[in-house]
Amino acid sequence: MSDLPTSESSRIRILDPRLANQIAAGEVVERPASVVKEIVENAIDAGSRRIEVELEAGGSRLIRVRDDGIGIGADDLPLALSRHATSKIASLDDLEDVASLGFRGEALASISSVSRLELISNAADDPSGGWRVVAEGRQMEPRVTPAPHPRGTSVLVRDLFFNTPARRKFLRTEKTEFGHVEEAFRRLALSRFDITWLLRHNQKVVHQLPGVASDQVGRERRISAMLGKRFLNEALYVELEATGLRLWGWVGQPTYSRAQADQQYFFVNGRIVRDRLVAHAIRQAYRDVMFHGRHPVFVLYLELDPRVVDVNVHPTKHEVRFRDGRLVHDFLFSSLHRALASVKPNDSEASAEGDLAGASGNADLVASKNPDGIVDDTAAWQQQRMSLAGQHREGAGGSYSSGPEAQRADRPAAQRIREFMAGYHALHPDHESSLLTPRADGAGAPGGEAADVALGERPAAAVTTLTQADDTQAPPLGYAVAQLHGVYILAQTARGMVIVDMHAAHERIVYERMKQQIHVGALDAQPLLVPVSMAVSAGEAEVAEQEREAFARLGVSLDAAGPETLLIRQVPALLADADIEPLIRDMLGDLERYGRSDRLETRINELLSTMACHGSVRANRLLTLPEMNALLRDMERTERSGQCNHGRPTWTEMSMTQLDKLFLRGQ
């Protein structure tokens, strides 16, 4: 028997409506979470202020979504379950300027073709004015009957994939499917802070979120309920606006990262998206500070003119296309890059100042007042010597004097602090302006003078000058009191204590100085004795010609030797021995896809990072108190000093409150 198609079976025919809808459902309805997303987006578009989602068996048995929106009139109900029927757009101009979440008009028809769907709605204030519509039969004919219902709409979806066994067998366990629904619910709740949300599963309330004010405090309350308080404690709030783009939201500090990308939420005009361009820009912003294999956390909102972004790219509308992708990419990268670079140790101190002042038993850490209300300038945080041999020891038993008189006697006066600061400035006379310059005596080699903490002075653009304050005010990282096992520096601060990994911290300081030296001026370039010929596509050749100036700024000279051939005539001196052709090819690919490339800069930074690692102070190197304090002051002035070049944290802090809890004091 021949398997060739017959003339009868190969004839073109129009599919019946149910089969056509089931095919469309394959794109839109993947699992119960997809159903919840589509129906809830319709509820948001209807102007709802309260949305309730109820599930049974992870959504495979029942999904009920109820809202208090404008409702659907009885005359429009038959069309609600028809394909390509919508009230949200009417022309191409509407599509190019679409502001609603849904606009295709095929979600309900697709869902009803693979489930038992029932829609009840009322567009009037009278509860008796509701109507029910269901679509039955092969032709999906809608049937409308009266049904009491308050103003708004309820959509019931029962027995998902009951008529498509092949699709149903791909559903996972009830727990897994509910996890996907909960994640979809979380995204929707983060998209609209003003809506009250309710999620039930098997008759139990899982999430109940009241609507909050559209200010930072109200939004943070919703963020905390969805992602936990620790997310907010470890996140930075950003809000920037430029060139018609506005970005606001929360980005996690590099030290708070995840093993998987499960807390990454990016919204474009209120729509959750997963976009390669956006992901690339954010990944670049974290490039220097994120530990290998970890993923950043963020909840970010980008607002721009709807006419410059195309949301009609994918059936699920998860992907978008920007008219000027390069502008968006550069805006996201530069905004987040600056926000992460601006984090300094004094930021964490300022944020906790209020908590510290109110902590019981720790008031003397902030300021000491005598009965006359005069501030005592011999506060407990000031620099003290730590002589373990002379602590008023009595006898072999080793009892120590620890009364208030003894503590007051050990405290240095304000003059002691001024003397220390004067000595520090004497060690670093040009601390604010000088550049790190190579030494002629070859001290830059690992283990030489370049390994000293006072390695040279940082460039002005790479540091932030601390506010000129009273000499008796404690710096953010306090003053060093000891070195632990030749690896860690222990410092006393106004809040408690700080432990610093001295090699990791110094590595970051040296790295930032070297980057500034390299990138402030023109990169040293080396012409190639024999130009390297590289075969490229016509598109890559066009990109190379368009970006000729950008390549030149990076020390690369490219010439066209034909329609699909490039000649590499010059490369950065630091990469003279590297295999440059794959690097240039990757750069062209990035420029073609994202509008910019940082691969060359990344390779150069990798070399600088290695040099900084080998040129930094090593473990088991004993430092004096002035050297340790110089390192702490350098950290306070250096960008990204919270992480080393490899993304590891450089310091951690324990407040007196935490220490008291550790030793059960006051309990």
Image: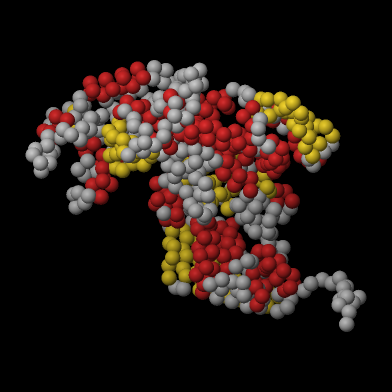
Residue farthest toward the bottom in the current orientation of the protein: 1
Depth check: 312 or 284 in front? 284
Residue farthest toward the left in the current orientation of the protein: 395
Residue 632 in the image: above or below residue 535 = above
Q: Quadrant of residue 253?
A: top left
Residue located 19% across and 29% down the image: 411
Q: How many marks?
A: 0
Depth check: 377 or 84 in front? 377
Residue 391 in the image: above or below residue 68 = above
| Residue 541 shown left or right of residue 99 in the figure | right
Residue 546 visible: no
Residue 331 in percent (x, y) is at 59, 37
- Colour scheme of the picture: secondary structure
Residue 628 in percent (x, y) is at 34, 30
In the rendered image, which quarter contains the N terminus?
bottom right
Residue located 31% across and 38% down the image: 484
Residue 457 in the image: above or below residue 2 = above
Residue 549 in percent (x, y) is at 71, 28
Depth check: 49 or 218 in front? 218
Residue 440 visible: yes
Residue located 29% across and 42% down the image: 655
Residue 506 in the image: above or below residue 8 = above
Residue 278 in percent (x, y) is at 60, 45
